[in-house]
Image (tube, rainbow, N blue to C red):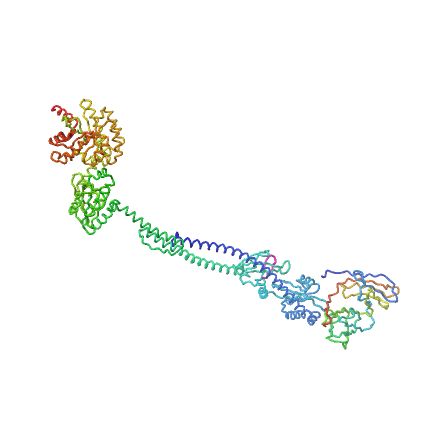
Amino acid sequence: MRTLILSISALFTALPVLAAGIDVHVSDANGKPLADAAVYAEPVNGKVPKGKLATIIDQVDKEFVPLVTVMQTGTAVRFPNKDNIRHHVYSFSPAKVFDLKLYSGTPAEPVVFDKPGQVVLGCNIHDWMIAYALVVDTPWFEKTGADGLAHLPELPPGDYTLKVWHPYQLADAAPVRLKSAAGAETQFKFQIKLAPPPARSRPKNQGSY
Amino acid sequence: MPTNSLSFRIVVFFVGLLAAVLIAAFLVVNAADLRISHDTSAKELRTGERIFHRLLEQRGAQLQQAANVVALDFGFRQAVATGETDTIVSVLQNHGSRIHAQLVMLSSLDNHILADTVRPERRGAAYPFPQLLKQRQDTTAPTDVEWIDGRLYQLVAVPVQAPITIGWVTMGFVIDDNTVHDLAELSGLQVSLLGRAKARWQGFASSLPEDSRNALADALPAHPAVTDRITLAGEDYEYRLSPLGGQEEQAIFGLFTRSVRESLAPFYALQKTLVVLAGIALLVCLAVGLQIARRITGPLVALAGVAQRIQRGDYRQTFETADQSEIGQLSGSLAHMQVAIAEREAEISKLAFQDTLTGLPNRLRFNQLLTEAIANASRTETALAVLLIDLDRFQQINDTLGHPMGDRVLQEVGARLREVIRQEDVVARLSGDEFALFLPGAQVSDAMHTIVRIHHVFDRRFELDGRPLDLRASVGAAGYPEHGSDATELIRCADLAMYRAKRSGQREALYDPSYLTFRQEHLSLLGDLQQAVERDELTLHFQPKVRVANGLAAEAEALVRWIHPERGFVPPSDFIPFAEQTGYIKEVTRWVLAKAVEQAGHWAREGKPIKVSVNLSTRDLKDEHLPVLVGELLSRFELDPTLLCLEITESGFMEDPGHALGILRRLRTLGVGLAIDDYGTGFSSLAYLRQLPITELKIDRAFVLELDHNLSDRMIVQSTIEMAHRLGLKVVAEGVESQAIVDVLASLECDLIQGYFYSKPIPAEAFRRWCDERLAVA
């Protein structure tokens, strides 16, 4: 199984850096625009300012919303339960291991994701409920939309590493070095090879829950 | 029961038939059963195999579900996803034990062992059952039977979801004898699980008996057929081999076996039942067959017994004739037959033992009775006398009065004899005019009284149709035990005595042992006589027949004389009768004829012709060749036929008159003279004689001897001569011994006289001289 290694190629074109920020386009192996891909830029010197360190991952109709969340390290995440049943959100991912025992409404304390990395979230009583979180050490990140486009705001001048991640990706895409300066490139394209999304068999008769 | 009896055959037939049918049925059923048994066995093996697979699948599915539940347990997932190796191993053991998995293995998505409960040191090694996981992605209930660490496991694999799949938990459930026993019970077969590595078999689990399963690995060929037969520890099995899983180099098979003995058990039970049934059927058939055979043959055997008793002469059998079957009919027929046989036998024995003419016992019966009487006399040591009675001149009665009259005479004689005997005496008619008597308890000397009474029987004159008839009889007597010890001997002795009496002219004679030796002498004499004829020991003598008219002898009777080399002179009466009895007389006659004709021819040529007479015997009158012989002799010796005369006796002629007449006529035709000898002793009438071609009568000496003083003899001779002359016959008187008689004969005009008065028989030379002397005297 390991033999299947998909080449991931990041294509970029040298474009002048616009004051309006950086545009990144992510597509799958077939060239189709890829939604829910995380795009983030890490400063090479490692010094980053703190961004907005709070976010929400809802549980609506026995699904996590959104499917993919990108956040800066140290972000406190609230898991409000919008359903009229209880959920048991947990993660065994090394970046953040936690579980919120059966609860309804919003737990009193948010969960702080204090280490960078991937976190897969599940619900212990609804196996099909899966959400992905990417914890990054930068406040400059964005998620692609249905058009495969993500727009990063204008970065302070300096050197950055531009990275792309998708929960279904087979391997990390090669990062791209970029310089935030006048006249620097601002347009980037990434192509990612994906594995099929995990089977998430959800019982047909939801009413019984 | 004898093997050739009807009963035996009937029983053997029916029992044999049934046995053949049963054997045929048995063979057919046997063949069918064996085939059915084999087919059933094959089908059962297939079904068992399917059931086993299904059971294995179900078990797999159950194990899978159980494993799934375990794998989804939050604590389990938490421990596996977040714990360190030791923790993971312990949680695997812990949760595995919940569902009794003996092997739990955690593997990464890239197929490396992350944790192993059996052998933790395998961590980091390649996952050994990759095809299980591959299968996992295709079906919902992946299961496999695998072989690791020398144990056989049924494996299921479940993903560890946290919440996405981060690895696999493989759970193994040991398949051992217990498992197999459960499965075997459900499938109804013996199940064995085997692994094959490098063409070597290894047994893991089996429901077979210990010794059979131990033999299994070695008994199975490296690449066996799917179905076949195998012998394990002396027990035959049919088997079906089915792959269960494993990998190329470690294949796992299920071997489904069924004991041939067990699968044939119901068949053998049926076979046993059939044999028992056949045995019962045969016994019943035997019993019924015997019964039927007995019913059929019982009456037959009874009838056979009856028939055997009839065969032994018991005709008083009673028959069961109520039965209307064939046997009843047979019985009826046998009953009729018995009556018929009894009647016929009575008739036959009457015919056999009774003289039909007189109603007296016949010779056969007489012999029987005499034998019994002798036995009786022997027992009681008493005497017994046997008398033989022969009527004199009975032949003449028959000839002159006819046979019906003769028969009546015999009947009368029989009746009279019966009257004169005692109660215990037995009288029988032996043959012709011969009667016999035996007197139990009588000495032969005492028999005289009876003999006298017998003579009195004949003294009373017989009256037949008013015609008076005189009869006389000769009686011979012999006595037991002095003369003989059995019937044949006694009768022979009495016979000899009777002949002696007859020959000697007496009315009775008692047997004397000398008679027998006398007779035996004759037998030896007969042999000598043959030699005598051949050696010319016989001679001819001539007795002159003197012509009354001139006293000259112009004729002569040729008489044979025998001078025996040792005995000397043998009188003709000692050998002629026996030569007649034996038939040798013919040779004697021929010799005499030849000599006489030769002599007559000789005399004729000398110019002194003598007419020569030759006696012919009874037997000669039957000899067809005789006339030819006489003719030859006449021509050979050139004799005038008129110079030869042939003499015959009345009785000699009477034995076969028709034939004798033919011979006589042929002789007469030759021109030869023919004379009746011993005339008057028989009963032939002159009228009868007239028909014969005779030329001469010779009056018997009995009438001549007393002719000079017996008036009645004289009357007889006179009338005879007169009648003979009227018939143109010459008359010769024999036995003339005195001149007185010569004178009487001369007065009665007798033609020729012969007798000692003139000369006894003398040789030819002497006769010649005698003639010459007579001539000289005359």
* Residue at position x 62%, y 67% in the image: B102
Location of residue A171 (image quadrant): bottom right
Q: State whether the magenta stretch is mostly helix, strand or loop.
A: strand
Q: Is residue B503 above or below residue B422?
A: above
The residue lying toward the viewer, choosing from B116 and B371, is B371
Determine the image quadrant of residue B717: top left
Q: Quadrant of the C terminus of chain B?
A: top left
For the question of whether residue A84 can be seen, the reply is: yes
Camera-side residue: A51 or A89? A89
Does the stretch in magenta take in B382? no
Residue lying at the far front in this picture: please name it.
B466
- Is residue B770 at least partly visible in the picture? no
- The x and y percentages for residue B56 are 62, 64
Q: Which residues, given as a range, are shown in magenta?
A: B192-201
Q: Quarter of the image containing the N terminus of chain B?
A: bottom left
Q: Is residue B617 depicted above or below B157 in this figure?
A: above
Q: Nearer the viewer, residue B753 or B478?
A: B753
Q: How many marks?
A: 0
Residue located 33% across and 54% down the image: B317
Question: Where does the image place residue B390, in percent across and percent down from the top left?
Answer: 20, 42
Q: Is residue B353 left or right of residue B459?
A: right
Q: Residue B444: where, in percent of width, then height?
A: 17, 46
The one nearer the camera, A105 or B49, is: B49
Q: Does residue B651 appear to the left or right of B2 in the view shown? A: left
Q: Quadrant of residue B49?
A: bottom right
- Residue positioned most to the bottom: A108
Please say if B694 is above or below B286.
above
Question: In the image, residue B636 lies at what x, y percent?
Answer: 24, 25
